[in-house]
Image (cartoon, rainbow, N blue to C red):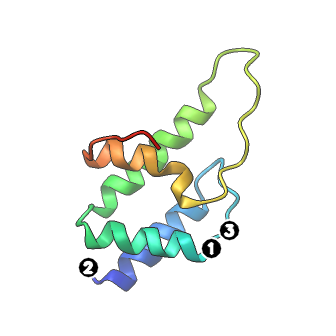
Amino acid sequence: MEQRDYVRRLLDAYRVTPGTCGTVRRPDRVLAAQLHQRGVPLEAVENAFVLAAARRLIRPAGAAPLETVRSLAGVSHDTKVKAGYPLQDE
């Protein structure tokens, strides 16, 4: 898949992921292009979005609501986990 198509599909999926603001900014496009360049399968990123949304929905009773995710980097932890990248302190 060409990078342009990969980035468009990834950002479309991000935009409709529950818990995100639905707005795409330049840093989101840059990160999406980097994921393509690293060879991260689009399906892995889409699955990570599902994982991130589920984690936001399944919270202990009485827990304070989480803020809206305002950038693709806000779900990058789940993307790295799903894609098999080693985690580093961020």
Q: Residue at x 76, y 25 (%)?
A: 64
Q: Residues within 10 Å of mark 1 (few under 14, many from 20)?
A: few
Residue 62 versus residue 27: which sits nearer the camera? 27
**Residue 83 tag number:** none
Q: Residue at x 32, y 53 (%)?
A: 44
Q: Which of the 4 image quadrants contains residue 14?
A: bottom right
Amino acid type assigned to the residue bearing label 1 in the image: Arg
CA distance separating discs 1 and 3: 7 Å
Amino acid type assigned to the residue bearing label 3 in the image: Thr
Instruction: Find disc 3 in the rendering and name its residue.
Output: 23
Image depth: mark 1 or mark 2 in front: 1
Instruction: Find disc 1 in the rendering and name its residue.
Output: 25
Give yes or no for contact between labels 1 and 3 (Cβ–Cβ under 8 Å): yes
CA distance separating discs 1 and 2: 22 Å
On the rendered image, what quadrant is the N terminus found in? Answer: bottom left
Dot 3 falls on a residue whose secondary structure is loop
Counting residues from the N terminus, which is met first, the one under dot 1 or under dot 2? 2
Image depth: mark 2 or mark 3 in front: 3
Left of 3 or right of it: where is 30? right
Q: Which of the 4 image quadrants contains residue 70?
A: bottom right
Image depth: mark 1 or mark 3 in front: 1
**Residue 1 tag number:** 2
Left of 16 or right of it: where is 75? left
Give yes or no for contact between labels 1 and 2 (Cβ–Cβ under 8 Å): no
CA distance separating discs 2 and 3: 24 Å
Q: Which of the 4 image quadrants contains residue 46?
A: bottom left
Amino acid type assigned to the residue bearing label 2 in the image: Met
Counting residues from the N terminus, which is met first, the one under dot 2 or under dot 3? 2
